[in-house]
Amino acid sequence: MSAETIDRSPVSDADVCVVGAGPAGALVAERLAAEREVVVLDAGPRFDPSDRLARQERAIRPSYDRPDVWDVGGERDAHSNGGERFYPLNHARVKGVGGSTLHWQGMVMRLHEADFNSETERGVGADWPVDYADLRPYYAAAERELGVAGASDNPYAPPREEPHPMPAFGPSYSDSLFAEACEELGIDMHSVPNARNSEAYDDRSACVGYGTCQPVCPAGAKYDATVHVERAEEKGATVIDRAAVGRLEHDADRVTAAVYETPDGGEHRQTADAFVVACGGVETPRLLLLSDSEEFPDGLANSSGTVGRFFMDHLFAGVGGTLDEPTRQNHVGFYTSACDQFYDEADAETAPFKLEFFNYAGPSPVEMALTGDDWGDDLLARLRDGYGTHVAMGGLVEQLPRSDSRVTLDPDRTDDRGNPVPEIHWSVDDRALRTIERANEIQRSILEALGAEIEWVAGPDATGPAYHHMGTTRMSADPDAGVVDADCRTHDLTNCWIASSSVFPTSGAMNPTLTIAALALRVADDVERRL
């Protein structure tokens, strides 16, 4: 059946309309579908799982760029940049059922307690209207839903109430090399929680080590949101793909319909009693801005003027080089050890940051072979000479929320539907840049103690985003200071919630997906309570 002939008509008598079928939208839909009539609208396609091996092969070929793997690009995904730094938006997202979890690496940490009270504890940023204690049971539930492999060996992690659902992945061979250098320097290493199966879990296999986790896991061992999309459908939810929502119709205090277009050129109105917008940190503010009206001339739910503002991403810090011995890289596509030792030293001058010990430094033999023009013995000699001795560390650094770092509508460019594309104005604060230097110092000291020849440094002048867009519909207790309240319900509209990293008032330096999932489960509970 072609995309044009599938029935994409609205669902009558819907209780809840969820816009976006990524991890947040999928979790909300699955949680509510047993008792409510739920419809999920997603702008992208439903990908065929049988195509994942082909996408894996595409991912390792140098002729393809990262967005090509999941068919991102073209006029549908057009965007522009207007800030002081270029933001590669299409490298950061997948449009389709499953969303960004189709290509994420799968690292799932909880934010630290002080991350929720940055202004009070560190003197910068903003305090969340919820704290760690409020999210603690939802973090545990999210770990069960996603299937997280982890251990309680991190003395710097926030308190938890129960073990992870699966045991942690063991240290890699290169982790053991790092461990010797870290012990010499008094630096602690610990395991990393992963949303991938270390053993069979939830009818999915254990990780088999393809090494292509980002951007493709052909085995299904790494969690992606299609798991909860399928569960929601089993409970009765309707999921409509290629349903591009262009605006939310509303009256003075309620959303009345999501207006969407389909591949056949038709326009439809999905009505519901409650609406959950789960489109991520860029498309969520874009949809609200596209839904302006006489009641909301500056964009829907934007009486505070903060829709689109405070756009954040984590900044990357890294150091890499080579050793004169094998390091066994690229056997897995994720890291198994990290260091949070310096995270809670953060203050007004230094941001929180975490350190990562990579298992995928340097090119893989496949990548090397595909980028050369030699054959036979010459190829074998080049691979033996160039592969297997690389070593590297990475790290994530918090960016402070800034009003001038924002998502707006481009006044001059439109997408394939004729709607203004998102324009990214990305700015970075000096505190983050100073902290990158601090992270580099520690990384360099570890590699030097290891005896590595340092060949590259991703410092303040060479940093880039970790592809974690956050903050554009921030949560606030004061309706004049943000878009949603502590329950992620919009201040201006009584039946509209936002489930997304866009509600983060600050970013911390931990990968955001587990917090997104925890908030989504909390949103689902609040929607059910108010219906």
Image (cartoon, helix red, strand yellow):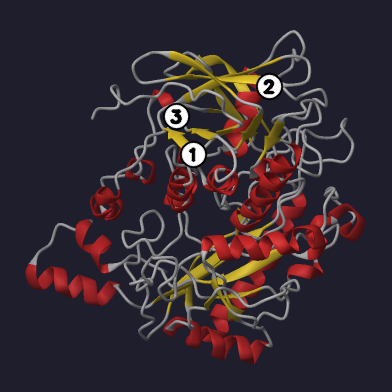
- Classify residue 286 by image quadrant: top right
Q: Is residue 188 visible?
A: yes
Residue 109 x %, y %: 63, 65
Image quarter of the N terminus: top left
The tag on residue 354 is none
Where is 320 relative to 402, above or below? below
Residue under the point 74% across and 68% down: 343
Relative side of 452 to 483, left or right = left
Residue occupied by mark 2: 255
Relative side of 293 to 119, left or right = left
Image quarter of the C terminus: top right
Residue type indicated by callout 3: Asp
Distance of label 1 from label 2 (alpha carbons): 20 Å
Number of residues whose C-alpha sits closer than 10 Å to that of mark 1, classed few (under 14), some (14–19) or many (20 or more): many
- Nearer the observer, disc 2 or disc 3? 2
Residue occupied by mark 3: 77
Label 1: element kind: loop
Residue under the point 49% across and 82% down: 175
Whichever of callouts 2 and 3 sits on the residue coming sooner in the sequence is 3
Number of residues whose C-alpha sits closer than 10 Å to that of mark 3, classed few (under 14), some (14–19) or many (20 or more): some
Q: Is residue 352 visible?
A: no
- Nearer the observer, disc 1 or disc 3? 1
Residue type indicated by callout 1: Ala
Residue 451 x %, y %: 50, 85
